[in-house]
Image (cartoon, coloured by chain):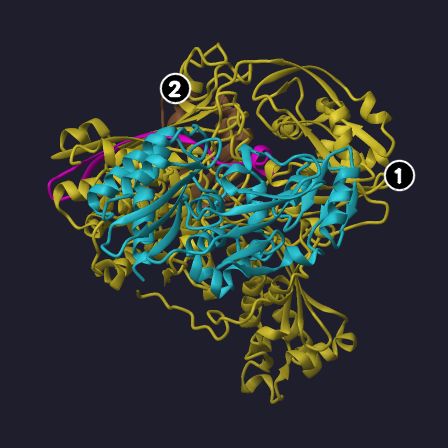
Amino acid sequence: MVQVMLWGSLTSFTEGRTALEIEAANIKELLERLEEHYPGLKPTLEKGVSVSIDGMIYNDAWFQPINPDSEVYLLPRLEGG
Amino acid sequence: MGTHEPAFDVVGTRPLRPDGVEKVTGSAKFGADLTAPGMLVGKILRSSHAHARIRSIDTSKAEALPGVKAVITCKNFDKAKISPAKQNILCNIMAQEKALYDGHAVAAVAAISNQIARKALRLIEVDYEVLAHVTDVEEAMRPSAPVIQDDMFTVGVTPQPTQASNIAKRSEFGHGDVEKGFSQADVIIERQFKTAATHQGYIEPHACLANVTQDGQGELWCCTQGHFMVREVCAELIGMDISKLRVTASEIGGGFGGKTTVFIEPVALVLSREAGRPVKIVMSRDEVFRASGPTSSTSMRVKIGAKNDGIFTACEAELKYQGGAFADSPVQLGAMSAFACYNLENVKTVGYDVATNRPKNVAYRAPGAPMAAYAVESVVAEIADRLGIDQLELRLKNAAREGTKSSYGPVFKRMGLVETLQAAKVHDHYSAPLGPNQGRGVASGFWFNFGGQTCVSLNINVDGTIAIAVGTPDIGGSRASMCLMAAEELGIAYDNVRTIIADTSSLGYNDVTDGSRATFASGLAIINAARDAKAKLCARAAKTWDIPAEAVIWENGCAKPAGANAGNFAPLSLAEIAANAEKTGGPIAGHFEVNAGGAGVSFATHIVDAEVDRETGFVKILRYTVAQDAGKAVHPSYVEGQFQGGAVQGIGWAINEEYIYGEDGKLQNPGFLDYRIPVASDLPMIDTVIVEVPNPGHPYGVRGVGETSIVPPLAAISNAVSAAAGVRLTELPMSPPRVLKALEDSPDR
Amino acid sequence: MRFEAPTSVDAAIKLLEGEPGVVRILAGGTDVLVQLRYGQVEPDLMVDIKRIAAMRSIDEEDGGYRIGAAVSGIEIGAHAGLRKLWPGVVEAMELIGSTQIQGRATLVGNLCNASPAADSVPAMVAAEATCRIFGPNGHRDIPVHNLASAPGETTLGRAELVGSIYLPSRRPNSGDAYLRFIPRTEMDIAVVGTGVSLEMDLDGVCKNARVALGAVAARVLLVDEAASALIGSRVDAAALENLSHAAAAACSPIDDKRGTKEFRTKITGVLVRRTAQIALQRSQE
């Protein structure tokens, strides 16, 4: 199980919880399980999110491994100028 | 430091850029510089209403005008076939049921001359039903405001509203308990701020040349930060296979985030398809201001509580960003980055993304962060003054460091904020004397940085020189940096490497040059492609010597036996191996493809001196110093250029730049005369200090540097002007009338 | 559009007389070419006056200078005699545009564009400059101040053009100056422009003064009340204060993107005082 942290506005889809326990070994599994357990997150996930694993930020890197003790944050999709 | 810092031979030097001569002699080919046989002029008809329903468009008279070869409207795009993610892009490049802002495209023509095209536009009859409009963020949030998108139901509030409004979403970030934090504070300062919308102000207007042939193949030449993005978006909007459209990026006269989407390109392609001839569209400056993608205007509230010793107990911000007709504001990034410079137990930021009758927002250098930093760093400066603590000292006391839980969640890895604060502190600027009516301001700023999809190739020519192809348009000297990194890795001279920006048919997909990613991500890919090539070079040497490949190493530009056991062979230089490539197995090339993570966060601290004319409100910037962490400066001159450029754009944003809308919802100042970017005589020399705290996510420690430099200026300048004026200024731009008014309203006067 | 480049004034007038449609005169082109490019004007005839020799020179005349309509800002700035005689007019002309624009832009063009914010006009009005108008019935001289009638409009009749500006000789112990306020340091249009010309007597008392204001009304204003505030004074703090008030009182600006009425009026009071101080200093040199 990994603990994934959500940003505030997503808690309306997760019964108010900002920290979720998810069984996932990589980003692909994480996103799939999140959508499975919390269908309300689907539009946000489809629009695209960034995932921070131990302080490194990834966009759409499905096979990036996640360790059980990794710090994982779901973040709005990062953009730049 | 403890960790081993790599030593460099070539990286860190300052050779001439490969695109320099062409640019200074005027022969470089920008977006508008290409012509084609039989080329037509494309022009776009734009709404002069801020908000109007389009009842009908009659193009018959324009079509009948001799010399007109095509007239198109939204009917020429197949909306039903376009994915939800690109619906807003389509709606922006050609209005559908409604015109949503002054300047919104409603039709386009292709004709044999400028004059005829212009005349044709006048012959197009659009029947508008003018609707009530709103351009101000606070007004747009009121329940009584005219609703711009009737399917916009605020996301991020529970329960989700069932009535449409202009508030697209509410976002919240942070941790801890700010109420508890404020209750522990000895001093609390809370302020309200406003900033005007600004434009990236690139000198080169959008321009493109499109040609779609009768067999459905397309070619597009355009100025963009990302031609692969242009290809994919255009292919979808006009219903074409990606493989049939080849896009070539021209040289680019500035982008700063504003060229990360499409405006005229799909229109030119459709006009060309209809007319059966090449079509060139060049935006006028007026069109650039009215119909490209400026950034948000904002209304913000920031509250900070601190103990008497300066330690922050709680930080809170409420950010309302106006995001144009489709609510594309970068408010989430503003809310995430607002307090990123600080180590906080209790922090909360709330952002609202709001639609108005203004152009669709597009990224502008560290999108969303400069405004939030302006509000936050203004209040930080006031806390320091209130507590009598030195400005930099207060920031150092509260500074985020490696291991700090960031205000947006993740724990920071190795980072250089403290180093930039220390560099500022010891800089002679910080202790230089000030004259009457002069003030000094400082501010720090943060940006995330980004990696992303990258694909490069590195070809070894028979004479031992190197041809590199990258897919990230060079907007800040990145070609020189690519050459430096390849030369470093291969152990050869910089002059032996040439980098080009390849077209979309020559490489795999590359993300746009944005997020300060080109030197980081394309650089990382180049280093790996060079390593790939080195392995192949070593293998060729091994074959030549008839020893195992593992027994060959690469050193100082040559393949060598790994040790005495491997055999006694004279080193083979890259040029020698290249010369025999045909005989040893054919061409030698290195490749690398990646979706790069690991872009290191970036921080900067700026110092500014300003002087205020108390009779006119005129602000003069006297001195400016930027200290920023570059991780590793690959080409220090271009790193300094990025630092200086960000500071200069910040000076414009802080002092004079603003989108001014009239009561009628029309943009009043769509030109560089009345949209005042700084001119050279407005500016002091921008001093720079390159701080190098290596990024663990890059082989050479590189961090992106392109964006962070625009984060601190608004606040640093406002702090300097406020100190000089003796009044806290809370609205941007600090144009003379606004500063004069603040001086007059000040109780001390 | 027909383009003609006559080599004499008469030929130019004939061309103007013969064209019933829209006509534009091209000297530097720094306004006309921009208008053309933006489709703001579509002339039937464009008459380039740069090939008319008389329009290309600066000539001494009765202790003053006559400046041809096609003389550029750079040429004016490089003319030592003009600089010495009417430094305020020269500095006003030099404020217009960039170095590139200076190579093309002309004093007469700035006048005939009839913008209330034209930089050179308040300085010329303060200097009591006249302009020579050529037309089908020969030529006539009028004060520069009377040329513009409204924003973008002049008192020129059909087939008339301005051929030159005359800056008169200067009396001893006199000086002129021009200042404008812009939000930047250059490349901008005056929010307010103030031209002051004054003459002192040997006792240090102001004998004559002319004060002209730009961008604060539909035309450039020549403000007698402001001049009166200086005449008879030593141009001391009290007189300058009166000057400020008189100038501010004469303003009737509009509110627009470049400044509010309130701001323009306040700045006029500040700027006119600073301008008078420079003119005073020059009168003593």
* Mark 1 crowd level (few <14, some 14–19, many ≥20, 10 Å Cα): few
Q: Position of residue C79 (x, y in %)?
A: 51, 63
Q: Quadrant of the C terminus of chain C?
A: bottom left
Q: Amino acid at mark 1?
A: Gln
Chain C shade in the render: cyan
Q: Residue at point 71% right, 44% down?
A: B208
Q: Position of residue A33 (x, y in %)?
A: 50, 30
Q: Amino acid at mark 2?
A: Glu
Q: Position of residue B553 (x, y in %)?
A: 57, 77
Instruction: In the rendered view, tell whether residue A41 sits above or below residue B113.
Output: above
Disc 1 element: loop
Frontmost residue, B407 versus B673: B673
Q: Chain of mark 1?
A: B
Frontmost residue, C30 versus B601: C30
Q: Which residue lies under the disc numbered 1?
A: B214
Q: Which residue lies under the disc numbered 2?
A: A15
Per the image, is B310 magenta? yes
Left or right of residue B162, residue A6 in this image: left
Chain A shade in the render: brown
Say whether residue B127 is visible.
Answer: yes
Left or right of residue A27, residue B18 in this image: right
Question: Residues in magenta?
Answer: B288-315
